[in-house]
Amino acid sequence: MLPYQSLEESEEALGRALSVAEKLWFQYSAQKLDFILHCHNILFVMLFYTLAPLPFVFIGLGWFKNMDKFKIQPKVNDCLSNMFKCYKHVMRTFVLVVGPLQVISYPTIQWTGIRTSLPLPSLSEVFWQIVVYFIIEDFSNYWIHRMLHTKWAYKKIHRVHHEYTAPIGLAAPYAHWAEILILGLPSFLGPALVPGHIVTYWLWIILRQLEAIETHSGYLLPWTPTKYIPFYGGAEYHDYHHFVGEQSKSNFASIFTYCDYIYGTNKGYRSHKQVIEKVKSL
């Protein structure tokens, strides 16, 4: 909740006029408890998880035949009933696990210093904080993901996520409830180490989810971020990891490829790509 009773009072406290965005933020958040603003996260997660995969759902159901050529594993088809089963599983996990976690984690948000106050961060501040969050999440997620591929962790936890050997966008957060909790730590680590405004935190959660959906989409589309973002793995990179499954020793990174390159866990993927290229050349 903002410590100002009016726009005029907030402008006097800041010593300048509020921007349009700051006026909108004041009108929206002035009378809302910080706890309520924090709990917006679960609403954003559920909303974007419902909407963002829809284009891939329609493509997978054959609504756009001209898009079939971009499918990474063209021999594998999915049906609406299985997609809906996946959706229900994920939404149940969001409601029963992620929702309560959001509620009980509020003191941690306060402790780290993620703020709701004015002024709003500049666009450059938001951009560089998001970049840092992606790098921190990618590095820490890499090591946790490798741990999940140990024999015990895979059998007890991670195998659920690998039920999709040909991943679909809806299956990005399809996992054992324990994995959702464990991999939530890397996502929160960046904002905890480099705290910013809660608007930046919201944007980070949304972008991370959109990235995961694209990575699990099963389609190498012409506008894939792989073509524009250095070291970005993307759908084809992660699809190989699911294709190999339990025996995979490659492509553990969630976003970028540099960790797999540095620690030598991309050799299987590189060999696979070489074989594919040879077959194409023949």
Image (spheres, helix red, strand yellow):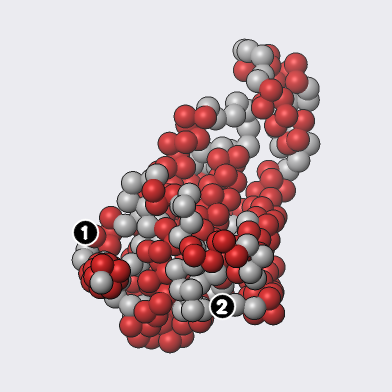
| Number of residues whose C-alpha sits closer than 10 Å to that of mark 2, classed few (under 14), some (14–19) or many (20 or more) | few
Q: Nearer the viewer, mark 2 or mark 1?
A: 2
Residue at image coords 67%, 19%: 18
Where residue 215 is drawn, which disc sits there? none
Task: Locate residue 154, reporting x and y percent.
Answer: 41, 82
Q: Residue, x 59% and y 29% (percent of image)?
A: 120
Q: Quadrant of residue 6?
A: top right
Whether residue 160 sits left or right of residue 81 in the image: it is left
Whether residue 197 is visible here, answered yes or no, is yes
- Distance Cα–Cα, label 2 vs label 1: 35 Å
Q: What residue is shown at x 72% (from left), y 48% (from top)?
A: 36
- Image quadrant assignment for residue 146: bottom left
Instruction: Establish if 282 lies above or below 12.
Output: below
Q: Nearer the viewer, residue 184 or 228?
A: 228
Near-viewer residue (176 or 271)? 271
Image coordinates for residue 84, horizontal then vertical, percent: 69, 75
Residue pointed to by mark 1: 262
Say left or right for 126 vs 270: right
> Where, quadrant-wise, is the N terminus in this rendering?
top right
Task: Tell me the tag on residue 77.
Answer: 2
Q: Amino acid at mark 1?
A: Ile
Mark 2: which amino acid? Asn
Closest to the observer: 261 or 194?
261
Place of residue 217 in the rendered image (x, y in percent of width and height, measured from the top left): 52, 64
- The answer to whether residue 100 shows anywhere in this view is no
- Which secondary structure lies at badge 2? loop
Considering only vertical position in the picture, is 187 above or below 281? above
Q: Which quarter of the rendered picture does the C terminus lie within? A: bottom left
